[in-house]
Amino acid sequence: MRAAALYGTVGSLILSALTTAPAGGATTAPPDGSAQARGVAVAARQAAARGIAFGRCAPVEKLPAAVECGTVSVPLDYARPHGRHIDLTVSRARATGRPAERQGSLIFNPGGPGGSGMAHPTLRDAPAWRGAARAYDFVGYAPRGVGRSAPISCQDPAEFTKAPTLSPRHPSEAFKRHKAAQARAYAQGCARRAGAALPYFTSLDNARDLDVLRAALGDARLNFVGASYGTYFGALYATLFPGHVRRVVFDSVVDPDPRQIWYRSNLAQAPAFENRWADWSRWVARHDAHYRLGRTPERVRAAYEWVHERLAREPAGGKVGPAQLQNAFLNVGYSDSYWASRAHVLAAYLRGDPKPLIAAASPDPATARADENENAVYTAVQCNDAQWPRDWRVWDRDNTLLARHAPFETWENAWMNLPCAFWPAHQRRPVDVGVSDHAPLPPTLLLAAERDAATPYPGALELQRRLPGAALVTELGAGTHGIGGGPNPCVNRHLETYLLTGRVPARRAYCAPRPEPRPVP
């Protein structure tokens, strides 16, 4: 399951003193001596010499005038730095403070894989980010394959967003064969449409691109906020380039253990989403006087399942079937900011008003191309990154067992990732993330919600174990995915202190949970 892209809009939710160095400083190759490492050094030197010609943003980006845009050129294949290059789109909002306050660029990645960070400079105006915005240029970018950064596609967007579709909790053998055939066709579509470029959409390449972007911005060392999937290739960056790190924030942490990447990571999400689904059901039951969906969590879930089954027979508005319902309600697992609105949608439908459900769950033709592109990048990166089971019987066994105890999202998650079982490109062995106690890695800051479903909490503990000097701030009893810059002032104090001073809290710091949502539509 995709770990959602975070920090997308202002309203949605993230050591040592600054040293000044010539543009492109610290571009020596990591000590592994690989052709790719040498290629990164070459590309970074070239990017530092060229810089980025920032100017007016393209209208398609829909960014305010205060944000400027440009491109940075990176090799498609870092083993051939003088071969084919692709352009990554970059956005920037200048620091708002005095020149003496400036600490360089702060690059954001919202996750995915497949999420675009082009809108992230607009966070500069959000109250939780204003302190950091005085010191840093806020920089966003679209990673390779995303948006206008050499975009890839695996399927016709209209076919990708076709609705309504089914989502059985316990699928029949015939349905499983149908989904396996779909997954095989999708993998073949990725190979056909991307061609020879397909193997070069990986997390390692994303980490290398980040170093070239750092050099192009003229920063000797990297300042970075990575959320969700951004924490994984941010951890790869720290592994490959520990001497290039200045300040790095990992928000909602992917478990970097190579044994988890990516098949087991996706399996681990199913019970975590089941727990968050239970959290939402309990909250709705406590507010039965408002929603009338049931006084117990069991009755709330039964109401949802009744709607799920009815939509299989009679899709709402002709477009919302069980899979569209599931996709809309999966958001309650990602963020409690959806709890009230989704409860309202369900209650309205059961009262005979399907309009809120149709509005919340219908595919939007206007975003079909972007949605398909995001999914194509997600699939390519995850399938290229690691070795997946090739035997359908393994998938069937594991997900059948999971669905007995965690039926809410198990099979939808499996279908999303199943193209990796039929992947036509070479699948790598994941890098063993981490640095030694003697590596020149400054303190880093990890942020995690204790009940996060998309990136379960043990992943934050694992990354902290692998990065000496990392400090972990935990939002207790909370499950929103992406907590930096959100409504918790305790989390935000730790975040701002780190970005402005480089100081981290004790190895473990804890914040009380944010207030629960109010029962309003």
Image (cartoon, rainbow, N blue to C red):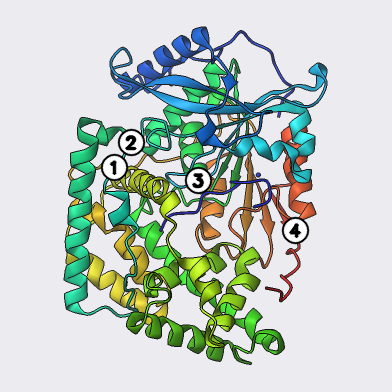
Which mark, by number, is residue 511?
A: 4
Instruction: Give the CA separation, mark 3 to mark 1.
Output: 17 Å
Is the residue marked by circle 1 packed among few (<14), some (14-19), or many (20+) residues within 10 Å?
A: many
Q: Quadrant of residue 170?
A: bottom left
| First along the sequence among labels 1 and 4 | 1
Type of the residue with mark 3: Gly
Q: Is residue 322 above or below residue 5?
A: below
Instruction: Give the CA separation, mark 4 to mark 2.
Output: 37 Å
Q: Which residue is mark 3?
A: 111
Q: Which residue is mark 1?
A: 384
Q: Is residue 492 above or below residue 81?
A: below
- Residue 260 x, y percent position in the rendering: 38, 54
Type of the residue with mark 1: Asn
Instruction: Give the CA separation, mark 1 to mark 2.
Output: 7 Å
Q: Kindly identify the residue that appears in the image at 65 percent across and 72 percent down.
A: 340
| First along the sequence among labels 3 and 2 | 3
